[in-house]
Amino acid sequence: MSKILLLNGPNLNLLGTREPEIYGTTTLDEIEKKLSSSAADAGHEFSSKQTNAEHEMIDLIQNAKISNVDVIIINPGPLTHTSIALRDTFLSTGIPFVEVHISNIFQREEFRKSSYLSDISIGCIIGCGIDGYGLAMRKVKNYLRDK
């Protein structure tokens, strides 16, 4: 059994009510339940965390290394575009991860079009709405199968 961790960054706790024209009406809790079920169906252990604080996100990734998490699905939210520290944490821990964005960051403001994480991820799912989380889980399950 492999361990999969879902991490969601700032403001993603507001899914379901936050700018529904961009992010939809599905809540983070609903997303977590679907992913948990998908992971369990494949025989994997699943956990999820959300934080609005960069330092907490870093602590969660470092703790994931200690806890032998095999792979992370992460929607870092705005930390995508600002956090060199988050990048360094992934490089330091060596945990493979899939980067998820609900909206198409390339159709938004100029500052959202760059990511400090994409080039070190095992995959990026961008602009597929909340379905992106399911696609990321599929990528993770395939990665674990082929590893």
Image (tube, rainbow, N blue to C red):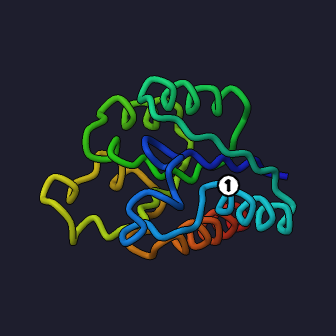
The residue lying toward the viewer, choosing from 116 and 95, is 116
**Left or right side of 112 for 93:** right
Q: Residue 62: x and y, percent?
A: 57, 27
Q: In this view, does 68 lie above or below 32?
A: above
Q: Residues within 10 Å of mark 1 (few under 14, many from 20)?
A: few
Q: Horizontal placement of 98 versus 43: left or right?
A: left
Residue 33's place in the image compared with 80, above or below, is: below
**Residue found 28% across the figure and 64% down from its top:** 105
Residue at 56% across, 33% down: 61
Task: Say if 106 sits above or below 98 in the image.
Answer: below
Name the residue at the left extreme. 110
Number of on-image labels: 1
Q: Quadrant of residue 106?
A: bottom left
Residue picked out by circle 1: 29
Residue at image coords 76%, 50%: 46
| Percent position of residue 80, x then y | 33, 47
Give amino acid for label 1: Asp
Q: In which image quadrant can residue 143 be found?
A: bottom right
User: Is residue 24 shown left or right of residue 35?
Assistant: left
The C terminus, quarter of image: bottom right
Task: Give how far across and how far down residue 109 sits, in percent.
Answer: 16, 60
Q: Which of 86 and 119 is in front in this view?
A: 86
Q: Is mark 1 on a helix, strand or loop?
A: helix
Which residue corresponds to the image point at 44% horizontal and 76% vertical from the top-left? 128
